[in-house]
Amino acid sequence: MGLVLLALPPLKAHLPLPPDLRYVVAPDTPVRAADYIQRHALSGPIFHRMEYGDYLLWRFYPQRRVFVDPRIELYSPELWEGYQRISQGGTEAGALLERYGIQVLLLDVERQAGLLAWARASGVWQLCYWDENEGTAVLARVCPAGETQ
């Protein structure tokens, strides 16, 4: 029980851990992009990098649905195949995003560059938020008023 308490985010930063393990959240966690989504009440299912899923689930459940998270055994092979096809971008990605009812894209600008480029050129998705330092972008079918980048 004591070890569980020590792992709580407010205490973790003070533990004698190597510097890369002291973070309350990992450095590549999309905290500011999630702040944007929450602040502007972007609703509907979110498509994102799989590695973001556990944080987004913790942050948004039950108000917003995430696409996948690292618990790969919970999702069907068909969903993982869809995740891979969407992540590549292109026309097939558009059809799958429609099929899954995705309303928000929270993308890693480097690892999901192909999907980001396709979405920006599609005419369907608007770039609402860009964070150069965090390496994230948020796109929606309709951005909040005055928020298009």
Image (cartoon, grey):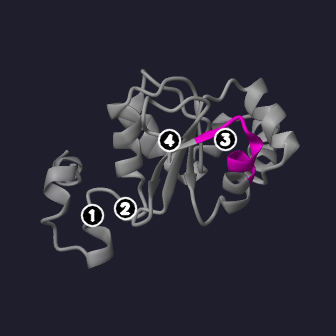
Residue indicated by mark 2? 26
Question: Marks 1/2: CA distance?
Answer: 6 Å
2 vs 4, front mark:
4
Label 2 residue SS: loop
Instruction: Pick whichever of labels 4 and 3 is earlier in the sequence.
Output: 3
Q: Are marks 1 and 4 in contact (CB under 8 Å)?
A: no
Q: Quadrant of residue 63?
A: top left
Label 3: few (<14), some (14–19) or many (≥20) C-alpha neighbours in 10 Å:
few
Q: Is residue 119 magenta?
A: yes
Amino acid type assigned to the residue bearing label 4 in the image: Thr
Q: What segment is highlighted magenta in the picture?
A: 118-126
Residue 73 tag number: 3
Q: Are marks 1 and 2 in contact (CB under 8 Å)?
A: yes
Q: Residue at x 35, y 50 (%)?
A: 32
Residue indicated by mark 1? 23
Question: Marks 1/3: CA distance?
Answer: 27 Å
Label 4 residue SS: loop
Label 2: few (<14), some (14–19) or many (≥20) C-alpha neighbours in 10 Å:
few
Residue indicated by mark 4? 148
Percent from the top left, x then y, of residue 27? Answer: 37, 65
Percent from the top left, x then y, of residue 17? Answer: 23, 73
Q: Give whichever of 142, 24 is nearer the camera.
A: 142
Question: Marks 1/4: CA distance?
Answer: 32 Å
Q: Are marks 2 and 4 in contact (CB under 8 Å)?
A: no
4 vs 3, front mark:
4
Q: Quadrant of the N terminus?
A: top left
1 vs 3, front mark:
1
Label 4: few (<14), some (14–19) or many (≥20) C-alpha neighbours in 10 Å:
some
Amino acid type assigned to the residue bearing label 2 in the image: Ala
Instruction: Pick whichever of labels 1 and 4 is earlier in the sequence.
Output: 1
Question: Marks 4/3: CA distance?
Answer: 37 Å
